[in-house]
Amino acid sequence: MAHTLRGLLLAILLVVAGVPASAKDYTVGDSSGWKPGVDYTAWAKGKPFSVGDTLSFQYGAAHSVLEVSEADHSACSASNPLRTHGDQSTTIPLTKPGTRYFICGTAGHCASGMKLAVTVSDGGATSSGPTMRSTNAKPAAGTTAAATEPDSSAAAAASGARLATGLMLGAVGFAALMG
Ligand SMILES: [Cu+2]
């Protein structure tokens, strides 16, 4: 029995570690993209942004994506951005837990709704798990920040869903062992 349980635990660990991290890419505003008149607070509400996910901003040449401080987000101030993007298709990797703030830099657009706050969770990951998926961590195009990540925290972000899947598969394996 002890051996069976140990085998079961090992099976669960292998399954959980072996399932590739299912990082999500969120297109900001969905089909509306990044433009005035969209309620991005409503868009973001309830979405489980996690470390390893990405935000994709799609917009026309009249717009931009400025990452700003919380205060500048509240005040719609574009004068002191942390980062500026203007390539009309901007992918932002969510590399660590916390809240990030984005506005459009064009005058008046933030006040017209082009402001977004995204709260990123760590996805319930612990740093003690196996990190054999590092080759799967796909660096987002056009960013230098991703290249300086010390480890693949993205890949290590085991979601609750993965754990649930692992447990379920483990239970199936357990049933098979006992049968
Ligand atoms: Cu704009």
Image (tube, helix red, strand yellow):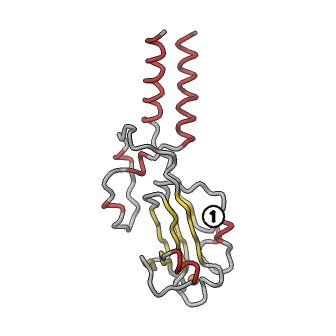
Q: Residue furthest front?
A: 71
Q: Who's the residue at 60% across and 82% down the image?
A: 110
Measuring from the top left, give residue 101's x and y in whole percent.
52, 72
| Viewer-nearest residue: 149 or 141 | 149
How many badges with numbers are in the image? 1
**Quadrant assignment, res 165:** top right
The amino acid sitting under disc 1 is Ala
* Residue at figure coordinates x 53%, y 20% from the top left: 173
Residue with the mark numbered 1: 44
Residue 67 at x, y = what percent? 47, 75
- Ligand 1: quadrant of the figure: bottom right
Q: Residue furthest bottom?
A: 107
Q: Compared to 116, does 21 lie above or below?
A: above
Q: Nearer the viewer, residue 27 or 123?
A: 123
- In this rendering, is residue 162 above or below 15? below
Q: Residue at x 48, y 77 (%)?
A: 68
